[in-house]
Image: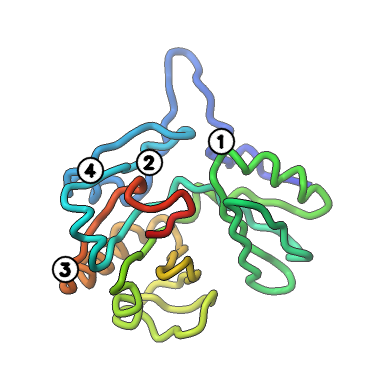
Amino acid sequence: MSTLEFMSVAAAADAGGFHPLAKSSLERRAREAGATFEERDGWLVPVSLPGEQEHLAHVGVADLSHLAKLEVRPAGEPVEGEGVVWYRISPKRALVLCAPALASSLRERLADRLVLDVTGALAIIAVAGPEADTVLRRITHLHTFPSGGEVAHVNAHVLRRGSGYWLVFAHELGHYLWEVVVDRAGALGGGPVGVDALGQDGQA
């Protein structure tokens, strides 16, 4: 069962000459850093940034907020599949992250549960590269993953992705948290990178 579908970013459609385009709360900072953007799945996505390969040699910071985010209640059995990240927050709810193109089929597979599309409510920052662990240690006391807690004074969920991490948090705090993470990465020789600098699964 799915509800509140009118809140889904994917529900936006062209009308009367208007072409809706979703933007991350981190878009302004990426643009200031010289990002090149492309429209993908209804989102304006920062695909590349100057110096990103040099940054990734240390630690790269990317905006993955365009990924679909579904809250599932109750959590129940996890749904698996290529490109699907399942995070069990509690027995009562889970968070599923995936490429926008996979969201519709996932809703069908979860038809026996309540599914809320929270894509527009949550942002995702990826931290990837050899110094990703160092950055995390400097912004949070969390040390087991996946886990929820305080990250630079922001309530967030931290998911381990390969040798890096995804930080999932409220969109309205994106501007602040992006600045904090990029600052910590910069001290280690890293910095912002585009989504195409990461693998298809959002890992370096």
Residue kind at label 3, given as amino acid type: Gly
Residue topped by disc 4: 35
Residue occupied by mark 2: 23
Q: What is the number of the mark on residue 168? A: none
Give the mark count.
4
Looking at the picture, how far across and down is residue 63, in whole percent?
Answer: 36, 53
Give the spatial CA distance, label 3 vs label 2.
Answer: 28 Å
Answer above or below: position of 86 versus 23. Answer: below
Q: Which residue is mark 1?
A: 10
**The disc labelled 4 sits on which kind of residue?**
Ala
Residue on which disc 3 sits: 189
Residue drawn at x 73%, y 69% is 92
Measure how far apart labels 4 and 1 are at the Cα level.
24 Å
Instruction: Specify few, some or many for label 1: CA neighbours under 10 Å numbering under 14, 14-19, or 20 or more.
Output: many
Q: Residue furthest right?
A: 112
Disc 3 secondary structure class? loop
| Residue under the point 32% across and 67% down | 129
